[in-house]
Amino acid sequence: MLICIDPGHGGRHPGAVHGDLVEKDIALNIALAMRECVEQKNHVSVVMTRETDEYVSIGERARIANRANADLFVSIHLNADPDPDEPCMHEASGEEILVYSELSTAYRLAQHMATTIDQVVPGAFRGVKFRPDLGVLAYTHMPAMLIECGFIDNTTGGQQLAEHPEVAGKIIARALLDAWGMQGNC
Ligand SMILES: [Zn+2]
């Protein structure tokens, strides 16, 4: 099995920023931890769309996965709450998985992953959502999903993802392998 892991943003595209937390850096660290975990499994290999802080276009991310003939494409992102962070206001929390449509194979996999992915950050899993407008989901030729690991501007969740990306990486790796019918060993 070949998994294409796609750390969101990079280079001149920081993604969401909250204080000193930057989405592109946290997403890369989570993605690298995921790779380390899934590669411990026999017969699983990984192709990355980026391994450093570099800009990679959406089209190129999909091309990397398509050229490698990956079995699965997983993009790693963090969410941001558009509301201003004011004291006593309700904070957005939890994880999301985005897939192309209800007919995608990825939709079935994502539903299977929900319970495990819910352990990534505090707050309830927000559900599997359909985003046919996202290039990485539309242009890839294999089951593809985008995981919003949590909100960068959530007081506990953002900090936790930044400080312990390996925890999120392992949970996501386990969820993926499990949905694929394999047992994760990390
Ligand atoms: Zn993002």
Image (cartoon, rainbow, N blue to C red):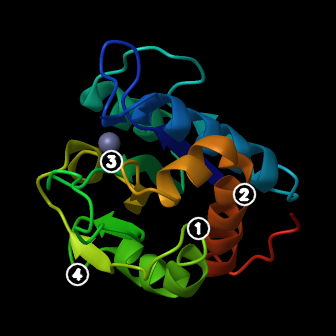
**Residue at 40% of width from left, 37% of height from top?**
8
Tell me the SS state at disc 3: loop
Q: Earlier in the sequence, mark 3 or mark 2?
A: 3
Q: Amino acid at mark 4?
A: Glu
Q: To which residue does mark 4 refer?
A: 102
Front-most of residues 20 and 98: 20
Q: Is mark 3 within 8 Å of ligand 1?
A: no
Let me know if residue 1 appears in the view: no
Q: Which mark is residue 167?
A: 2
State the separation of the CA atoms marked 1 and 3: 26 Å
Q: Earlier in the sequence, mark 1 or mark 3?
A: 1
Front-most of residues 26 and 179: 26
Q: Which mark is residue 28?
A: none
Quarter occupied by residue 154:
bottom left
State the separation of the CA atoms marked 4 and 2: 29 Å
Q: Which mark is residue 140?
A: 3
Q: Of circles 1 and 3, which is in front?
A: 1
State the separation of the CA atoms marked 2 and 1: 8 Å
Q: Of circles 4 and 3, which is in front?
A: 4
Q: Which mark is residue 120?
A: 1
> 10 Å neighbourhood of mark 2: few (<14), some, or many (≥20)?
some
Tell me the SS state at disc 4: loop
**Residue at 54% of width from left, 44% of height from top?**
4
Let me know if residue 86 appears in the view: yes
Q: Amino acid at mark 2?
A: Val
Question: Percent position (x, y) of residue 177?
Answer: 69, 70
**Residue at 72% of width from left, 44% of height from top?**
33
Q: Amino acid at mark 3?
A: Thr
The N terminus lies in which quarter of the figure?
bottom right
Question: Percent position (x, y) of residue 93?
Answer: 37, 69
| Ligand 1 rendered quadrant | top left
